[in-house]
Image: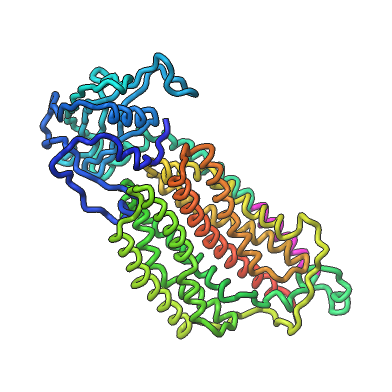
Amino acid sequence: HTHDDIDDEAEDALPRQKREARLQHKQRLGESITGDRRETAPFEITYKDTIEWRQLCKTTLGPDELESFKKAIHNSYFFEMFVEDLPMWGYIGDVSDEDVVLGEVEGSKTYLFPHLHFKLGTNKGNIVSATVTTDSDRRVDITNSHKPTEVQFSYSVDWVWEKDLTWKTRMSRYHDSRFLPGSFEIHWLSIINSFVLVLLLTAFLTIILMRVLKNDFSRYMELDEETMEEEESGWKLIHGDVFRFPENSSLFCASVGTGVQLMLCTFAVLVLALTGAVSTTRRGSILAGCIVVYCITSFISGYASTNLYLKMNGKAWTRCVLLAATLFPVPVAAVFMIVNTIALGHGSTSALPFGTIFTLTFLYVCISVPLCVFGGSVAKNYGRHDFNAPTRTTKVAREIPTDVPWYRGKPFQMVIAGFLPFSAIYIELHYIFASMWGHQIYTLFGILLFAFVLLVIVSSFITVALLYFQLAREDHQWWWATFFNGGMTGIYIYVYSIFYYYHRSGMSGLLQSSFYFGYMAAVSFGFFLMLGSAAFYMSLAFVKHIYGRIKCD
């Protein structure tokens, strides 16, 4: 059974019980963004009042209504209800003797579940658990959709005392819910596996680099000027070019600054989710948290990008700040406009209401941009602007050798740079995707934080190792190269998302495809910037360290 985003048109086509006023709930920002529209259900339940059986309504379903119910049941649609923010799920109906490949065949029957049984658990005056089950004894056969069928909708309620479940731990039940995978052990196995891989990798790289560098240092220290000229190759030869600043330095600094902001933003949101400051079970609350934290941390991108830009002797710092303020939000806004237009065309609730769009625009224009500009002006007036390069840069750039074997070229290095960090988070990605796109609750934020830290460390280490090989072949244009090598994992995440869409998600149609590929592109771009900036700072420290150790004129 698939647990995909419910296609809104089909959901709206499902017959609804006519009530005088369907009470709309006040929407939270997160709910609006994720396309959820909550309404009050018609079930009347009083605290600790057990109900054996109560009729909700009696109605006759016509051919059209029966057909839409059948379609929903065959597509494994499920409903979601909330009691005290505790979600509960159930199927609308079931199919017996259905062929897995062909679907409905001769002799298979479609049943509707008109009776719901609620089981609510209490502890110290609070509702701490909520489940809903369907009663197969009271099911109604709707196989023949041409014949109008009378259906009696009803419900029952049981109250139980949960002595081991407190208000604070009430979400722990969702780890092993029938609707969610019991994946805790797999999580730990995958993380331990990744951790061991990372440890071996970093130890391996450190040992190799230390030994190689030690040999290089001793060799370069012993050589005098004449023999140095005869020395065919090596990273010392480019000491006069290695600190030559990159082309498009304002774009480079804006990318690095935005990456730093996104990394701190991700870290902050994960910590908030872990400490419970952001609710992890309310649909969309993590997303709303990300947006607010992003706006608040805009100061960091303004400061980091301008500070780096001024160290590179940049003159147009305002251009750099504006680039930093728009580099990530503008592509995301472009994706949003396309996706929202498609959602509006489909009449989907995923199309954001005007109020939410106004709120998001207000947050960006009145909080994010001013903070970014403020960060830039603080960097300009109070930041340290000396680059402290350990070697002097020559006036004329040295030629870069072009006859390098393919396995030492930049394209191959980028492939390697992305693959190893991606393999460390590969298994965790599956659960995150299931949570993002499959309406599952993700609760293991401690593991996620750990995986994120691992990812940053591995991508930085790999980039430094590849940087050594780049410098050894006398290629001094390392600034953009390290940024791209670090960020390649973001591209891998996008490639994985394409695989997930076709082989795991069960999604289809223009609406779902545009949402999925549009927003996955935005997420992958965010990872590209984050990991690229982390790798760059690590590489900068490495380059300064090795060139600071050798004697240069």
Q: Main secondary structure of the magenta part?
A: helix
Q: Position of residue 77 (x, y in %)?
A: 35, 33
Question: Which corner quadrant of the image does residue 337 belong to?
Answer: bottom left
Q: Position of residue 226 (x, y in %)?
A: 88, 79
* Residue ID at (45%, 78%): 376
Vertically, is 108 above or below 156?
Answer: above
Vertically, is 310 above or below 336?
Answer: below
Magenta run includes residue 96? no
* Residue ID at (33%, 61%): 357
Q: Closest to the observer: 250 or 431?
A: 250
Q: In this orientation, does residue 518 appear?
A: yes
Q: Position of residue 180 (x, y in %)?
A: 39, 35
* Residue ID at (19%, 43%): 40
* Residue ID at (58%, 51%): 492
Q: Closest to the observer: 119 or 535?
A: 119
Q: Which residue is farthest top? A: 107
Classify residue 210 as left or right of residue 258: right
Q: Position of residue 291 (x, y in %)?
A: 37, 61
Magenta run includes residue 212? yes
Classify residue 295 as left or right of residue 547: left
Q: Which residues make up the magenta segment?
A: 203-219
